[in-house]
Image: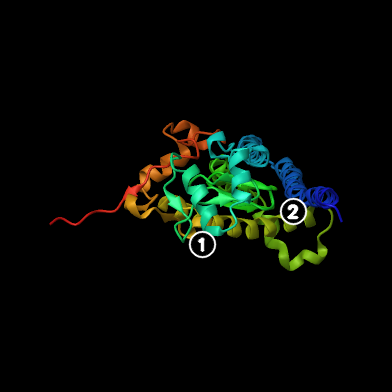
Amino acid sequence: MQPNSVKKRENSLWTYFAYFSWIPVLLVSGIFAWSVYISIIVISRRPDEVLGIFSIIVFVTIFFMIFWSFLCLIYSTSSIIPEEFKLWTPTIKEQSEAGTLKKNRVILKDFAKNLPLKTTNSDGSIRYCEKCKHIKPDRCHHCSSCRTCILKMDHHCPWIYNCVSFSNYKFFFLFLFYSILGCLYIIYTTFSDGYNISNISELHGDDFQIVTLFYMAMLLCVGATLLLLYHFCLLMKNQTTVERIQKPVFKSNLSIESYNIGVKNNFLEVFGNNVILWWFPIFTAKGDGIHFPVRYKQTPDI
């Protein structure tokens, strides 16, 4: 089989895979729409007009923020790798003709000597992406699902069919936060109906759906809370999920300890300095996804 035929077949398979990858996103969207529908039914049953109006305000605010954060997560794109990290055509040709791994590493090291790199592979070699043909910036990793390198990649999330990374980590945080609030709102407003689990066989129509939503909200609330707490711990240490699994290797001559620059600074690096904008899925992260402040090792006093 010819190389072009193989490539064409791979692209065709990838197209089918991309279509199926939207199923989890549609599932989340369906659960969201169904939750909104049932919540409207619950609100319409409020006998107290003032309490009903207050419930509508809270309902609209929370679910609008969930939907806004979700859309930002889905449609946010990874920041583009700067051109200076991409290998020139002559360099790629020289690399293919290198013959040995040692010569290949020398070529990459020479190309990357003026790039702002603080990390290397575990063996000290330059971090290079064979598929994208460029030097990987610090904290950048290749995502096989997105088929590209992602700046400050945390993880690929199938529920949004996108990577959680430098460009949308704040949106991910807010989506979890407002989802938890939404679950708590549903639990509170449907508690009296949800408590009728002993008589569930007698429930029909909307009542059955309300009880189902009550218990689903409880499960989602626990799951989202645990996930938020995990990422909050990572945020406080200025770590990504990838770095939690495999710690970055810093160049030995730089005496760098980690990206952890203190709890406050770690938080501000993702959410920015504007307190008002912290609560909205608007990009406010510091930096460009290429350069990151670091904490240096303390040298003992002599």
Viewer-side residue, 78 vs 28: 78
Tell me residue 155's x, y (percent). Answer: 59, 53
- Residue at image location 59% in from the left, 55% down from the top: 224
Residue picked out by circle 2: 210
Q: Nearer the viewer, mark 2 or mark 1?
A: 1
Tell me, yes or no, whether the two marked residues, 2 and 1, touch with CB atoms within 8 Å. Answer: no
- Residue 289, given in percent of the width and then of the height, sits at 50, 39
Classify mark 2: helix, strand or loop: helix
Q: Which of 299 and 67 is in front in this view?
A: 299
Residue 293 higher or lower than 224, as above or below:
above
- Whether residue 241 appears in this view of the structure is no
Residue that numbered label 1 is attached to:
245
The quadrant in which the N terminus is found is bottom right
* Residue 169 pos. (x, y %): 55, 44
**Residue, far bottom:** 198
Given the current orientation, which residue lies at the most extreme left position? 302
Q: In this view, does 63 lie to the left or right of 121?
A: right
Circle 1: element type: helix
Looking at the picture, tell me which residue is in the foreground, 141 or 63.
Answer: 141
| Number of marks | 2
> What is the x, y in percent for residue 9?
85, 51
Q: Is residue 150 left or right of residue 41?
A: left
Mark 2 or mark 1, earlier in chain = 2
Q: Can residue 278 be seen in this view?
A: yes
Q: Going by the image, does 133 lie left or right of 45? A: left
Please state which amino acid type lies under the numbered disc 1: Ile
